[in-house]
Amino acid sequence: MHTSAPAAGNPPATEAPAPAILVLEDGRTFTGRSFGARGETFGEAVFSTGMSGYQETLTDPSYHRQVVVATAPHIGNTGWNDEDDESGRIWVAGYVVRDVARIPSSWRSRRGLGEELATQGVVGIGGIDTRALTRHLRERGAMRVGISTETLDPERLRERVLAQAQMAGADLVADVTTAGPYVVDAVGEKQFTVAAVDLGIKTMTPRRLAERGMEVHVLPATSTLADITATGADGVFFSNGPGDPAVADAPVALLQEVLDARLPYFGICFGNQIFGRALGLGTTKLKYGHRGINQPVLDRSTGRVEVTAHNHGFAVEAPPGDRAETPWGTASVSHHCLNDGVVEGLELRGEDGGLRAFSVQYHPEAAAGPHDASYLFDRFVEVMERARGEAEDPRVTGSGTDVPTDGEEAR
């Protein structure tokens, strides 16, 4: 945490940019200038299509071990503030931009973007053709990359790039989860207790839950069902996070225990992939993924198209007919992406047709926006209310969570 900061619009003097190169694993090379810290960094090259919200992107733990390419041409206009971080640090392995703002212009800015990157030791590169780089990644797929101000020979840097681990098969949850449990108090009168398993949770997510009267107990990824029930949880939440869901066996086993205990469940992003695996579905690595805050998704239960925030390189494989019978009820695909048909949500209904658990691949907490999907937190409230009603009277059917009829508002 910074203890002092320059006035907005008056950034401190910084070093002159040094020459830098970016080399992809297939040998494609871009030459630019240093941005942020000097040195070398490696990761998986991915692109984000958001026009704003770079601070939230850079501090999202889901970007651990990834080098993010900003498709927006001008980055850094609003500087860096002390309010919008989605975690306690920058998680991206590197940052790639075309034009770097020389002077931030925002009343909330406390320092420049480049200064914050340098302070946290994050290597970036500016002044390159990010449009050409993005097109290359779309055609060839996300791949390993290196950025360096020290090794300016492309072949030497490429050798180091090829020595890096692939994202497929990477188990990264232990790197990002909280070291110990903590509680985010409900806003106003407490209505529910939620156990949130931290697989790389963003700061805004517990806030969105708390705004709806939930006392949120954020737990480490190593937690057990006993740890969850000890909180008195009315429902369980699994967060976003980095890495390959195909190797995240411990969270899958934990979620299956949660389902056995008939606890209401809500998951986002990585939590959606874990839910898919728990239900017996497979996962796959996408060619270049979905990253940005302008992705169209269809909610099948309402027929509405939402503009949503995404950050994922893996996805759940749809079951035949988009439905599957499981030990806990009928699972089905509830949302899909209108760009490419990728599964963007799952739901689990019991024998009576009532919603028991659900998840989405995108981010309804949506910092820095959009907010089309914020109703999903209200849907979680409905599921927990239904479960509470069943506990008090098993004859309760919970019609509030059934598929709405034509003309009904689901939000």
Image (tube, rainbow, N blue to C red):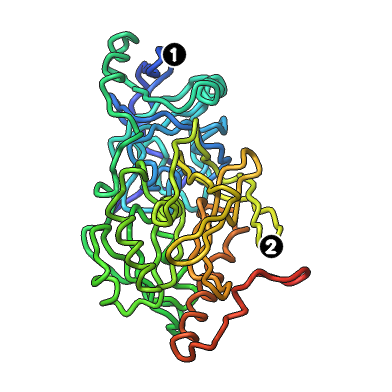
Looking at the rendered image, the quarter that the C terminus falls into is: bottom right
Q: Position of residue 408 (x, y in %)?
A: 74, 72
Q: Which label sits on residue 28?
A: 1
Residue at the disc numbered 2 = 302
Q: Dot 1: within a 10 Å radius of its alpha carbon, few (fewer than 14), some, or many (20 or more) residues?
A: few
- Sequence-wise first label, 1 or 2: 1
Q: Can I make out residue 85 in this image?
A: no
**212 versus 252 height, above or below:** below
Q: Can I make out residue 410 in this image?
A: yes
Locate residue 190 relative to residue 332 in the image: left or right: left
Tell me which amino acid carries mark 2: Thr
**52 versus 129 height, above or below:** below
Q: Which residue is pictured at 57% across the width and 82% down the height? A: 397
Tell me which amino acid carries mark 1: Arg
Which is nearer the eye, 399 or 381?
399
Q: Dot 2: within a 10 Å radius of its alpha carbon, few (fewer than 14), some, or many (20 or more) residues?
A: some
- Helix or strand or loop: what does disc 1 sit on? loop
**144 versus 375 height, above or below:** above
**228 versus 131 height, above or below:** below
- Helix or strand or loop: what does disc 2 sit on? loop
Which is nearer the eye, 333 or 407?
333
Q: Position of residue 301 (x, y in %)?
A: 66, 62
Mark 1–mark 2 CB contact (< 8 Å)? no
Outermost residue, bottom side? 393
Which is nearer the eye, 288 or 157?
288
Image label count: 2
The quarter holding residue 63 reads top left
